[in-house]
Amino acid sequence: MKAAVIIESLTGNTWKAGEMIAANLQQENWSITGVSAAKTPDHKSIQDADVVIVGTWVHGLFVVGQSPWGIDRLRALPAMAGKKAVGFCTFALNPGRSLDVMTRELEGRGAQVIGGLALHRGKLAEHSEEFALRLVDATSSL
Ligand SMILES: Cc1cc2nc3c(=O)[nH]c(=O)nc-3n(C[C@H](O)[C@H](O)[C@H](O)COP(=O)(O)O)c2cc1C
């Protein structure tokens, strides 16, 4: 399978998670068409991918009002009709319904959303591996 990774990150956690997810997928024999920032998404990497992985971070008041940061940027991503998409968000305390919001936005770009996971910023390596393994599992049964 071929995957593109698109990331919105302020302090680097989400970027790190995206890179770890890409590395984990490569170990499972996936190819990564590109890792780029949501602000300047690599359109060719999206075009070339079967699955588009989009990651951002949770912004809010920690217990209430959480949402994925950069919704406008998710909304401005290129059209993804015919692509599968998976969202992830990194968080500190509680992701709230951030993944649901991401799913809605990715569906709005025409993608078929096949899953998503919230990754705790203190467990990025474990959660990135879990994300990649779940994704490989989910796509192998399609
Ligand atoms: C202004 C601000 C608000 C945040 N609000 C929340 C929140 O409501 N809930 C939560 O779990 N984490 C919250 N966080 C933590 C971030 O989601 C977490 O540190 C994330 O990994 C940052 O990703 P990044 O390093 O890619 O920017 C907040 C961080 C910032 C800077």
Image (cartoon, rainbow, N blue to C red):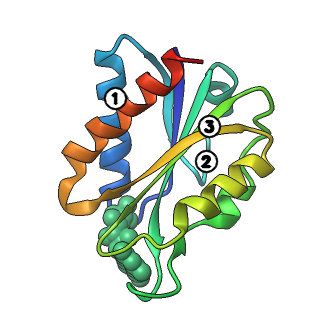
> Which residue is nearer to you in this view: 118 or 142?
142
Marking on residue 40: 2
Q: Which residue is mark 1?
A: 133
Residue at (53% x, 66% y) in the render: 98
Q: Which circle, 1 or 2, is nearer the viewer? A: 1
SS for dot 3: strand
SS for dot 2: loop
The tag earlier along the polypeptide, 3 or 2, is 2
Residue 60 x %, y % = 47, 83
Position of 60 relative to 119 (above/below): below
Marking on residue 22: none
Position of 92 relative to 138 (above/below): below
Horizontal placement of 124 versus 106: left or right? left
Disc 1/disc 2 C-alpha distance (Å): 27 Å
Callout 2 crowding tier (Cα within 10 Å): few <14, some 14–19, many ≥20: few
Position of 11 relative to 64 (above/below): above
